[in-house]
Amino acid sequence: MFRISQYMQEIAAPTPLGPKRNPPGPVVIWNLIRRCNLTCKHCYSISADTNFPGELSTEQVYTVMDDLKDFRVPVLILSGGEPLLRPDIFDIAKRAKARGFYVGLSSNGTLIDENNIDKIAECDFDYVGVSLDGIRETHDKFRRLDGAFEASLKGIRLCRELGLKIGVRFTMTQDNAHDLPALLKLVEDEGIDRFYFSHLNYAGRGNKNRKDDAQHQLTRWAMDLLFDTCWEYNQRGLNKEFTTGNNDADGVYFLHWVRRRFPGQGGACRGQAAPVGRQFVGRQCRQYRQPRQCAP
Ligand code: SF4
């Protein structure tokens, strides 16, 4: 995960490099259930609206949770499939909170409604992430359900009304890149706290549909837009978080953006971001290589 907003803050108000941090353990995105009410084109878990064998029982979940605690994992993101389809999801979330984890709920949002919003709020989630892969028809086509966009947006609004920290997750391909500017506007208009940009994960149906993935210049365009928007929010004092995932080369591309945008002034940020760049600079990257002339 690449936390753009943190590096933007370093550009706005550079801080000296501190000692090397020793983070306690990895963030765990926990796919607690494979069943889902949707069948999205890019689903890496090949989820569907059916029960799959081999799911963990509640007791088994608690045992794994205790192991993760012993392993010093600080963050659990409860995901799926659709985690709200687990009848014990609220018990699991409350136990995770009681054990001291930072707990997020990662949902497609279509099942968040008036019947369960109070239970969701009672869990005191630190963060609720809802997937939006475009505006209306684009999202519904991607998610293969008419009305999915409206249902997810309603879920977002219900969470926000109860003061939950809410984020939107967007997976970009050639099919929905054109909606990225409108989605970023929606993030501001709806008072959404976080925007998570995901590159396509080449697994499951995501792998089957990898021919639809965004290529090269389209990915560069999206990253530039994301960085520009994040910087603008920073300058306006809007406290929104921008992160990306599933492409480690984003850190390297960010360093190039800093050099272009702030020639001669990127030293502080470069110092902070260097570990990110060094870690990934040697890897070949499917999205950034072979620049081409194409536009969204
Ligand atoms: S991507 Fe998420 S919402 Fe879509 S089918 Fe897979 S688990 Fe369900």
Image: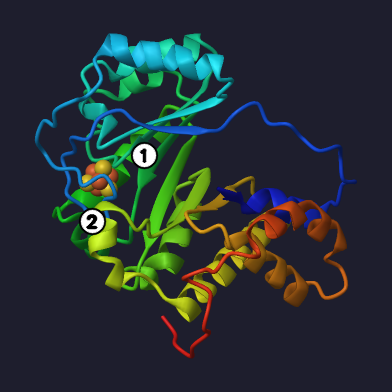
Q: Quadrant of the C terminus?
A: bottom left
From the viewer's perspective, tell me whether residue 252 is left or right of residue 89.
right
Residue at 66 percent across and 64 percent down: it is 281
Q: Residues within 10 Å of mark 1 (few under 14, many from 20)?
A: some
Residue at 21 percent across and 47 percent down: it is 46
Residue furthest to the right: 16
- Secondary element at tag 2: helix
Q: Is residue 29 visible?
A: yes
Q: Amino acid at mark 2?
A: Arg
Q: Quadrant of residue 261?
A: bottom right
Q: Quadrant of residue 203?
A: bottom left
Disc 2: residue Cβ within 8 A of ligand 1's nearest atom: yes
Residue where numbered disc 1 is placed: 157
- Secondary element at tag 1: helix
Residue where numbered disc 2 is placed: 205
Q: Position of residue 86 (x, y in %)?
A: 22, 23
Up-down: is 258 above or below 139? Answer: below
Q: Is residue 136 visible?
A: no
**Nearer to us in this view, 208 or 90:** 208
Q: Amino acid at mark 1?
A: Arg
Instruction: Tell me how far mark 2 sits from mark 1, CA to CA.
Output: 29 Å
Q: Which mark is residue 44?
A: none
| Marks 2 and 1 in Cβ contact (< 8 Å) | no
